[in-house]
Amino acid sequence: MYCVRCGTKNEDGYKYCYKCGSELPSTSGESISFKEDVKPVSKGTNPLMSEWMRASAVFIAFFIIIAILFPVFADKLYKSSYVCAWCGNRVNEVYYDHTDMYNEELFMCKNCAREYYGGLYEQFKVDDDLLRAIDKRQNSTSSTSSDNEAFANTNNSDLPNEGRESAVAPKIVETMTNDRDRESVKHDLIPVDLEIGGTILFGRYEQDGNSKNGAEPIEWIVLMIGEDRALLLSRYVLDNVKYNEVLSDTTWESCSLRSWLNTAFYNTAFNREERELVILSTNRNEDNPNSKTIGGVDTQDHVFILDYSDLRAYFNFSKWNDKTYDGYSQQLITDATVYAKSANGGTLSTKTMTREEYYKIYQGYGYNKDIIGKSGSRWWTRTPGVKQDYACDVDEFGNAGLYDNRKGAGDSYAVNSDFIGVRPAIWVRIV
Protein backbone atom coordinates (compact mmCIF):
# COMPACT_ATOMS: atom_id res chain seq x y z
CA MET A 1 0.00 0.00 0.00
CA TYR A 2 1.37 3.47 -0.93
CA CYS A 3 0.89 6.67 0.98
CA VAL A 4 -1.16 9.12 -1.04
CA ARG A 5 0.75 12.05 0.45
CA CYS A 6 4.44 11.14 0.26
CA GLY A 7 4.33 8.08 -2.00
CA THR A 8 6.10 5.80 0.48
CA LYS A 9 5.28 2.09 0.27
CA ASN A 10 3.82 0.73 3.52
CA GLU A 11 3.05 -2.85 4.52
CA ASP A 12 -0.53 -4.01 4.46
CA GLY A 13 -2.21 -3.48 7.77
CA TYR A 14 -0.60 -0.11 8.52
CA LYS A 15 -3.13 2.56 9.40
CA TYR A 16 -0.63 5.42 9.21
CA CYS A 17 2.32 5.99 6.89
CA TYR A 18 5.47 5.14 8.81
CA LYS A 19 7.40 7.99 7.14
CA CYS A 20 5.11 11.02 7.09
CA GLY A 21 2.41 9.90 9.54
CA SER A 22 -0.48 10.48 7.18
CA GLU A 23 -3.52 8.23 7.49
CA LEU A 24 -3.55 5.46 4.92
CA PRO A 25 -6.71 4.54 3.03
CA SER A 26 -8.51 1.50 4.41
CA THR A 27 -8.59 -1.59 2.19
CA SER A 28 -11.74 -2.95 3.83
CA GLY A 29 -14.43 -1.95 6.16
CA GLU A 30 -12.62 -3.46 9.13
CA SER A 31 -10.60 -1.33 11.43
CA ILE A 32 -7.07 -2.49 11.04
CA SER A 33 -4.59 -1.46 13.74
CA PHE A 34 -0.97 -0.65 12.82
CA LYS A 35 2.02 -2.50 14.14
CA GLU A 36 3.37 -1.48 17.50
CA ASP A 37 6.80 -0.48 16.13
CA VAL A 38 5.33 1.87 13.54
CA LYS A 39 4.10 5.06 15.20
CA PRO A 40 2.47 7.97 13.52
CA VAL A 41 4.21 11.32 13.75
CA SER A 42 2.62 13.94 15.91
CA LYS A 43 0.10 16.27 14.39
CA GLY A 44 1.46 19.52 12.97
CA THR A 45 4.76 18.02 11.65
CA ASN A 46 5.59 19.20 8.11
CA PRO A 47 7.75 16.66 6.27
CA LEU A 48 8.63 19.19 3.55
CA MET A 49 10.02 21.55 6.20
CA SER A 50 12.23 18.78 7.58
CA GLU A 51 13.66 18.12 4.13
CA TRP A 52 14.35 21.87 3.63
CA MET A 53 16.16 22.09 6.95
CA ARG A 54 18.40 19.17 6.05
CA ALA A 55 19.21 20.75 2.67
CA SER A 56 19.93 24.09 4.34
CA ALA A 57 22.34 22.45 6.75
CA VAL A 58 24.24 20.91 3.81
CA PHE A 59 24.49 24.28 2.04
CA ILE A 60 25.66 26.07 5.19
CA ALA A 61 28.35 23.46 5.77
CA PHE A 62 29.46 23.80 2.14
CA PHE A 63 29.83 27.59 2.34
CA ILE A 64 31.72 27.34 5.64
CA ILE A 65 34.24 25.02 3.99
CA ILE A 66 34.56 27.38 0.99
CA ALA A 67 35.13 30.35 3.32
CA ILE A 68 37.94 28.49 5.09
CA LEU A 69 39.69 27.27 1.94
CA PHE A 70 39.20 30.35 -0.28
CA PRO A 71 41.97 32.54 1.24
CA VAL A 72 44.45 29.67 0.83
CA PHE A 73 43.91 29.23 -2.91
CA ALA A 74 42.46 32.59 -4.03
CA ASP A 75 45.78 34.41 -4.35
CA LYS A 76 47.33 31.66 -6.46
CA LEU A 77 44.25 31.33 -8.65
CA TYR A 78 44.09 35.11 -9.07
CA LYS A 79 47.70 35.45 -10.14
CA SER A 80 47.61 32.50 -12.48
CA SER A 81 45.06 34.39 -14.57
CA TYR A 82 47.69 36.98 -15.54
CA VAL A 83 50.57 36.93 -17.97
CA CYS A 84 54.20 37.81 -17.29
CA ALA A 85 54.70 41.52 -18.03
CA TRP A 86 58.20 40.82 -19.36
CA CYS A 87 57.91 37.76 -21.61
CA GLY A 88 54.15 37.63 -22.18
CA ASN A 89 53.76 33.99 -21.07
CA ARG A 90 50.95 32.99 -18.75
CA VAL A 91 52.03 33.07 -15.13
CA ASN A 92 51.81 29.76 -13.26
CA GLU A 93 54.30 30.60 -10.50
CA VAL A 94 54.68 34.28 -9.65
CA TYR A 95 58.06 35.51 -8.46
CA TYR A 96 57.44 39.22 -8.32
CA ASP A 97 54.51 41.55 -8.69
CA HIS A 98 54.01 45.27 -8.31
CA THR A 99 51.56 48.00 -9.15
CA ASP A 100 52.59 50.41 -11.87
CA MET A 101 51.82 54.11 -12.14
CA TYR A 102 48.45 53.35 -13.74
CA ASN A 103 47.46 51.22 -10.73
CA GLU A 104 47.56 48.07 -12.82
CA GLU A 105 49.18 45.04 -11.23
CA LEU A 106 52.07 43.57 -13.18
CA PHE A 107 53.64 40.12 -12.70
CA MET A 108 56.99 38.54 -13.45
CA CYS A 109 57.39 34.81 -14.03
CA LYS A 110 60.23 32.89 -12.41
CA ASN A 111 62.15 32.44 -15.64
CA CYS A 112 62.27 36.19 -16.25
CA ALA A 113 63.11 36.75 -12.58
CA ARG A 114 66.11 34.41 -12.82
CA GLU A 115 67.39 36.24 -15.89
CA TYR A 116 66.64 39.74 -14.65
CA TYR A 117 67.60 39.51 -10.97
CA GLY A 118 70.31 36.88 -11.23
CA GLY A 119 71.54 35.75 -7.82
CA LEU A 120 68.94 37.86 -6.05
CA TYR A 121 66.23 35.51 -7.28
CA GLU A 122 66.76 33.05 -4.45
CA GLN A 123 66.72 35.87 -1.87
CA PHE A 124 63.24 37.09 -2.67
CA LYS A 125 61.71 36.13 0.68
CA VAL A 126 63.49 38.02 3.42
CA ASP A 127 62.30 37.70 7.00
CA ASP A 128 63.11 39.91 9.97
CA ASP A 129 65.70 37.51 11.38
CA LEU A 130 67.67 37.60 8.13
CA LEU A 131 67.43 41.39 7.97
CA ARG A 132 68.82 41.66 11.51
CA ALA A 133 71.62 39.25 10.66
CA ILE A 134 72.55 41.26 7.56
CA ASP A 135 72.49 44.49 9.57
CA LYS A 136 74.75 43.01 12.22
CA ARG A 137 77.22 41.66 9.65
CA GLN A 138 77.39 44.90 7.70
CA ASN A 139 77.74 47.07 10.78
CA SER A 140 80.70 45.00 11.92
CA THR A 141 82.41 45.15 8.51
CA SER A 142 84.04 48.39 7.36
CA SER A 143 83.30 49.49 3.82
CA THR A 144 86.18 48.99 1.42
CA SER A 145 85.02 51.64 -1.02
CA SER A 146 82.47 54.43 -1.07
CA ASP A 147 79.99 55.43 -3.73
CA ASN A 148 82.10 58.48 -4.48
CA GLU A 149 85.11 56.27 -5.24
CA ALA A 150 82.98 54.28 -7.68
CA PHE A 151 82.74 57.36 -9.88
CA ALA A 152 86.49 57.52 -10.27
CA ASN A 153 86.50 53.94 -11.55
CA THR A 154 83.93 54.58 -14.28
CA ASN A 155 85.22 53.51 -17.70
CA ASN A 156 84.15 56.02 -20.34
CA SER A 157 85.72 54.21 -23.29
CA ASP A 158 82.46 52.54 -24.23
CA LEU A 159 80.17 55.51 -23.77
CA PRO A 160 77.37 55.93 -26.32
CA ASN A 161 77.09 59.02 -28.51
CA GLU A 162 80.24 59.12 -30.58
CA GLY A 163 81.91 62.51 -30.70
CA ARG A 164 80.93 63.36 -27.09
CA GLU A 165 83.59 65.25 -25.18
CA SER A 166 85.56 63.07 -22.79
CA ALA A 167 83.44 62.78 -19.69
CA VAL A 168 84.81 62.63 -16.18
CA ALA A 169 82.54 60.63 -13.92
CA PRO A 170 81.16 62.95 -11.23
CA LYS A 171 81.42 62.28 -7.52
CA ILE A 172 77.77 62.80 -6.67
CA VAL A 173 77.16 63.61 -3.01
CA GLU A 174 74.46 61.25 -1.70
CA THR A 175 73.67 63.01 1.58
CA MET A 176 71.19 65.85 1.85
CA THR A 177 72.63 69.35 2.31
CA ASN A 178 71.22 71.19 5.31
CA ASP A 179 70.33 74.88 5.41
CA ARG A 180 73.64 75.85 7.03
CA ASP A 181 75.57 74.20 4.20
CA ARG A 182 73.42 76.00 1.63
CA GLU A 183 74.12 79.41 3.16
CA SER A 184 77.86 78.75 3.30
CA VAL A 185 78.10 78.42 -0.51
CA LYS A 186 78.89 81.65 -2.30
CA HIS A 187 76.09 82.72 -4.62
CA ASP A 188 77.69 85.36 -6.84
CA LEU A 189 79.28 84.24 -10.10
CA ILE A 190 80.45 80.80 -11.16
CA PRO A 191 83.78 80.08 -9.38
CA VAL A 192 86.81 79.05 -11.44
CA ASP A 193 87.78 76.27 -9.02
CA LEU A 194 84.78 74.05 -9.71
CA GLU A 195 85.09 70.34 -8.96
CA ILE A 196 83.25 67.57 -10.75
CA GLY A 197 80.69 66.15 -8.35
CA GLY A 198 80.73 69.31 -6.27
CA THR A 199 77.73 71.58 -5.83
CA ILE A 200 77.20 75.31 -6.30
CA LEU A 201 74.31 77.71 -5.88
CA PHE A 202 73.18 79.61 -8.94
CA GLY A 203 69.83 81.26 -9.64
CA ARG A 204 66.72 81.11 -7.49
CA TYR A 205 63.45 79.18 -7.64
CA GLU A 206 60.61 78.55 -5.21
CA GLN A 207 61.40 75.37 -3.27
CA ASP A 208 60.13 75.42 0.32
CA GLY A 209 56.50 76.01 -0.66
CA ASN A 210 56.38 79.36 1.15
CA SER A 211 56.25 82.09 -1.48
CA LYS A 212 56.15 84.81 1.19
CA ASN A 213 59.84 84.33 2.04
CA GLY A 214 60.93 84.53 -1.60
CA ALA A 215 62.58 82.00 -3.90
CA GLU A 216 65.44 79.85 -2.61
CA PRO A 217 68.90 79.48 -4.24
CA ILE A 218 69.07 76.56 -6.69
CA GLU A 219 71.68 73.95 -5.87
CA TRP A 220 73.43 72.40 -8.88
CA ILE A 221 75.68 69.36 -9.27
CA VAL A 222 78.72 69.85 -11.50
CA LEU A 223 78.62 67.02 -14.04
CA MET A 224 81.39 68.11 -16.38
CA ILE A 225 84.00 70.85 -16.74
CA GLY A 226 85.27 71.99 -20.13
CA GLU A 227 87.86 74.58 -21.05
CA ASP A 228 85.56 77.54 -20.55
CA ARG A 229 82.27 76.03 -19.45
CA ALA A 230 80.65 73.60 -17.04
CA LEU A 231 77.58 71.35 -17.22
CA LEU A 232 75.24 71.66 -14.24
CA LEU A 233 72.25 69.52 -13.18
CA SER A 234 69.80 70.60 -10.49
CA ARG A 235 70.38 68.54 -7.41
CA TYR A 236 66.68 68.15 -6.68
CA VAL A 237 63.52 67.80 -8.72
CA LEU A 238 62.42 71.44 -8.89
CA ASP A 239 58.94 71.20 -10.36
CA ASN A 240 56.22 68.86 -11.61
CA VAL A 241 55.66 69.68 -15.29
CA LYS A 242 54.31 67.46 -18.06
CA TYR A 243 56.60 66.57 -20.96
CA ASN A 244 53.83 67.75 -23.23
CA GLU A 245 50.49 69.26 -22.28
CA VAL A 246 48.51 67.03 -24.67
CA LEU A 247 48.92 63.38 -25.57
CA SER A 248 50.31 63.44 -29.10
CA ASP A 249 53.35 62.36 -31.08
CA THR A 250 56.13 64.50 -29.68
CA THR A 251 59.88 65.06 -29.85
CA TRP A 252 62.05 67.19 -27.60
CA GLU A 253 61.99 69.95 -30.23
CA SER A 254 58.20 70.28 -30.14
CA CYS A 255 57.32 69.39 -26.54
CA SER A 256 55.81 71.99 -24.20
CA LEU A 257 58.36 71.18 -21.46
CA ARG A 258 61.20 72.53 -23.63
CA SER A 259 59.24 75.73 -24.20
CA TRP A 260 58.53 76.11 -20.48
CA LEU A 261 62.17 75.57 -19.49
CA ASN A 262 63.49 78.12 -21.96
CA THR A 263 60.92 80.81 -21.21
CA ALA A 264 59.09 80.65 -17.87
CA PHE A 265 61.74 78.78 -15.90
CA TYR A 266 64.72 80.54 -17.57
CA ASN A 267 63.36 84.00 -16.85
CA THR A 268 62.14 83.15 -13.37
CA ALA A 269 65.21 81.30 -12.10
CA PHE A 270 67.93 83.65 -13.40
CA ASN A 271 68.39 87.41 -13.30
CA ARG A 272 69.91 89.31 -16.20
CA GLU A 273 73.49 88.87 -14.99
CA GLU A 274 72.98 85.13 -14.49
CA ARG A 275 71.30 84.68 -17.87
CA GLU A 276 74.43 86.11 -19.49
CA LEU A 277 76.37 83.15 -18.03
CA VAL A 278 73.94 80.48 -19.31
CA ILE A 279 75.18 79.24 -22.68
CA LEU A 280 72.86 78.57 -25.61
CA SER A 281 73.97 74.97 -26.23
CA THR A 282 73.26 72.54 -29.05
CA ASN A 283 71.66 69.26 -28.00
CA ARG A 284 71.77 66.14 -30.12
CA ASN A 285 68.44 64.35 -29.74
CA GLU A 286 69.07 60.68 -30.40
CA ASP A 287 66.50 58.04 -31.30
CA ASN A 288 65.42 55.52 -28.67
CA PRO A 289 68.09 52.79 -29.10
CA ASN A 290 65.66 50.04 -28.19
CA SER A 291 62.38 50.93 -29.91
CA LYS A 292 63.96 53.19 -32.58
CA THR A 293 61.43 55.90 -31.76
CA ILE A 294 62.51 59.14 -33.42
CA GLY A 295 64.37 61.62 -31.23
CA GLY A 296 64.04 64.50 -33.63
CA VAL A 297 66.38 67.19 -34.91
CA ASP A 298 69.15 68.84 -32.91
CA THR A 299 68.01 71.76 -30.78
CA GLN A 300 69.55 74.85 -29.23
CA ASP A 301 68.56 75.37 -25.62
CA HIS A 302 69.52 77.54 -22.69
CA VAL A 303 67.85 75.05 -20.34
CA PHE A 304 67.23 71.39 -21.10
CA ILE A 305 66.98 67.94 -19.48
CA LEU A 306 69.40 65.04 -19.81
CA ASP A 307 68.96 62.13 -22.20
CA TYR A 308 69.98 58.48 -21.74
CA SER A 309 73.39 59.06 -23.31
CA ASP A 310 74.02 61.73 -20.68
CA LEU A 311 73.01 59.33 -17.91
CA ARG A 312 75.47 56.73 -19.17
CA ALA A 313 78.24 59.31 -19.54
CA TYR A 314 77.98 61.16 -16.26
CA PHE A 315 76.69 58.57 -13.78
CA ASN A 316 77.97 55.21 -12.63
CA PHE A 317 75.53 52.32 -13.17
CA SER A 318 76.14 49.50 -10.72
CA LYS A 319 73.89 47.27 -12.86
CA TRP A 320 73.38 47.61 -16.62
CA ASN A 321 71.88 45.30 -19.23
CA ASP A 322 73.04 46.05 -22.79
CA LYS A 323 70.34 43.78 -24.22
CA THR A 324 67.43 45.69 -22.70
CA TYR A 325 69.24 49.01 -22.33
CA ASP A 326 68.22 49.06 -18.69
CA GLY A 327 70.18 49.79 -15.55
CA TYR A 328 70.30 50.95 -11.95
CA SER A 329 72.31 53.75 -10.39
CA GLN A 330 72.03 54.99 -6.82
CA GLN A 331 73.50 58.26 -8.01
CA LEU A 332 70.36 58.96 -10.06
CA ILE A 333 68.16 58.93 -6.96
CA THR A 334 67.08 62.40 -5.88
CA ASP A 335 64.26 63.84 -3.83
CA ALA A 336 61.94 66.64 -4.88
CA THR A 337 61.55 69.99 -3.20
CA VAL A 338 58.52 70.69 -1.04
CA TYR A 339 57.20 72.97 -3.76
CA ALA A 340 57.61 70.33 -6.49
CA LYS A 341 55.76 67.74 -4.40
CA SER A 342 52.80 70.07 -3.98
CA ALA A 343 52.76 71.41 -7.54
CA ASN A 344 50.19 70.27 -10.09
CA GLY A 345 47.87 68.97 -7.41
CA GLY A 346 50.56 67.00 -5.57
CA THR A 347 50.67 64.21 -8.15
CA LEU A 348 54.46 63.82 -8.32
CA SER A 349 55.49 60.21 -7.69
CA THR A 350 57.80 59.92 -4.66
CA LYS A 351 58.75 56.77 -2.76
CA THR A 352 60.86 55.94 0.28
CA MET A 353 63.29 53.00 0.24
CA THR A 354 62.34 50.37 2.83
CA ARG A 355 64.74 47.94 4.47
CA GLU A 356 62.96 45.01 2.88
CA GLU A 357 63.17 46.51 -0.61
CA TYR A 358 66.85 47.29 -0.14
CA TYR A 359 67.84 43.80 0.99
CA LYS A 360 65.57 42.05 -1.51
CA ILE A 361 66.71 43.90 -4.59
CA TYR A 362 68.82 47.02 -4.36
CA GLN A 363 71.67 45.69 -2.24
CA GLY A 364 72.40 43.30 -5.08
CA TYR A 365 72.50 46.24 -7.48
CA GLY A 366 75.42 47.73 -5.55
CA TYR A 367 73.44 50.33 -3.64
CA ASN A 368 74.76 51.56 -0.29
CA LYS A 369 72.60 50.74 2.72
CA ASP A 370 72.49 54.43 3.63
CA ILE A 371 69.76 54.73 1.01
CA ILE A 372 67.31 52.99 3.39
CA GLY A 373 64.76 55.54 4.54
CA LYS A 374 65.67 58.05 1.81
CA SER A 375 63.05 59.31 -0.62
CA GLY A 376 63.32 59.55 -4.39
CA SER A 377 61.14 61.11 -7.08
CA ARG A 378 60.64 60.43 -10.78
CA TRP A 379 62.16 62.84 -13.32
CA TRP A 380 61.98 63.20 -17.10
CA THR A 381 64.69 62.61 -19.68
CA ARG A 382 64.41 63.90 -23.23
CA THR A 383 64.88 60.41 -24.73
CA PRO A 384 61.70 59.37 -26.57
CA GLY A 385 59.77 56.39 -25.21
CA VAL A 386 58.78 53.16 -26.90
CA LYS A 387 56.05 55.07 -28.69
CA GLN A 388 56.21 58.56 -30.19
CA ASP A 389 53.78 59.92 -27.60
CA TYR A 390 55.88 58.52 -24.74
CA ALA A 391 59.06 59.83 -23.10
CA CYS A 392 61.58 58.06 -20.87
CA ASP A 393 62.20 58.87 -17.24
CA VAL A 394 64.26 57.85 -14.21
CA ASP A 395 62.21 56.19 -11.49
CA GLU A 396 62.22 56.84 -7.76
CA PHE A 397 65.01 54.34 -7.04
CA GLY A 398 67.41 55.16 -9.87
CA ASN A 399 66.18 52.77 -12.57
CA ALA A 400 66.58 54.00 -16.15
CA GLY A 401 65.37 51.48 -18.70
CA LEU A 402 64.10 51.19 -22.25
CA TYR A 403 62.89 47.59 -22.07
CA ASP A 404 59.45 46.80 -23.48
CA ASN A 405 56.84 45.15 -21.26
CA ARG A 406 53.39 43.75 -22.08
CA LYS A 407 51.86 47.24 -22.11
CA GLY A 408 54.46 48.58 -24.53
CA ALA A 409 55.64 51.16 -22.01
CA GLY A 410 58.82 49.93 -20.32
CA ASP A 411 60.32 52.79 -18.30
CA SER A 412 58.61 55.41 -20.43
CA TYR A 413 55.26 57.06 -19.95
CA ALA A 414 52.72 59.11 -21.84
CA VAL A 415 54.03 62.61 -22.49
CA ASN A 416 51.08 64.15 -20.66
CA SER A 417 51.71 62.15 -17.45
CA ASP A 418 51.49 64.34 -14.35
CA PHE A 419 53.53 62.29 -11.89
CA ILE A 420 57.05 62.91 -13.28
CA GLY A 421 59.18 65.89 -12.28
CA VAL A 422 61.89 68.05 -13.83
CA ARG A 423 65.62 68.36 -13.10
CA PRO A 424 66.83 71.20 -15.31
CA ALA A 425 70.35 71.17 -16.78
CA ILE A 426 72.41 74.10 -18.06
CA TRP A 427 75.83 74.90 -19.51
CA VAL A 428 77.42 77.95 -17.85
CA ARG A 429 80.50 80.01 -18.62
CA ILE A 430 83.37 79.77 -16.20
CA VAL A 431 84.44 83.28 -15.20
Image (cartoon, rainbow, N blue to C red):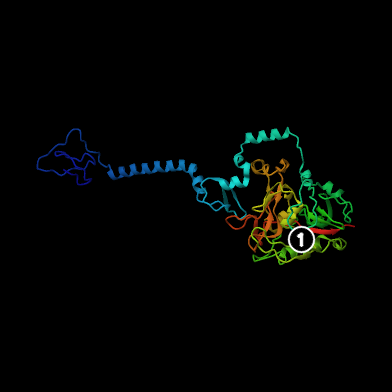
Closest to the observer, 122 or 189? 122
Across and down, in percent, residue 60 comes to 40, 42
| 30, above or below 266, in the image | above
| Point 65% across, 36% down: residue | 131
Element type at mark 1: loop
Quadrant where the N terminus sits is top left
Residue 282 position by quadrant:
bottom right
Say which amino acid is labelled 1: Phe
**Which residue corresponds to mark 1?**
304
Quadrant where the C terminus sits is bottom right
Across and down, in percent, residue 405 comes to 59, 55
Q: Is residue 194 among what the camera can see?
A: yes
Across and down, in percent, residue 17 comes to 20, 41
Left/right of residue 62 with respect to residue 276 in the rendered view: left
Residue 426 position by quadrant:
bottom right
The number of callouts visible is 1
| CA neighbours of label 1 inside 10 A, class few (<14), some (14 to 19), many (20+) | many
| Point 53% across, 52% down: residue | 89
Q: Is residue 334 among what the camera can see?
A: no
Across and down, in percent, residue 188 comes to 89, 55
**Residue furthest to the left:** 29
Closest to the observer, 261 or 253? 253
Left/right of residue 77 with respect to residue 323 in the rendered view: left
Closest to the observer, 157 or 288? 157
| Point 73% across, 56% down: residue | 160
Closest to the observer, 127 or 85? 85
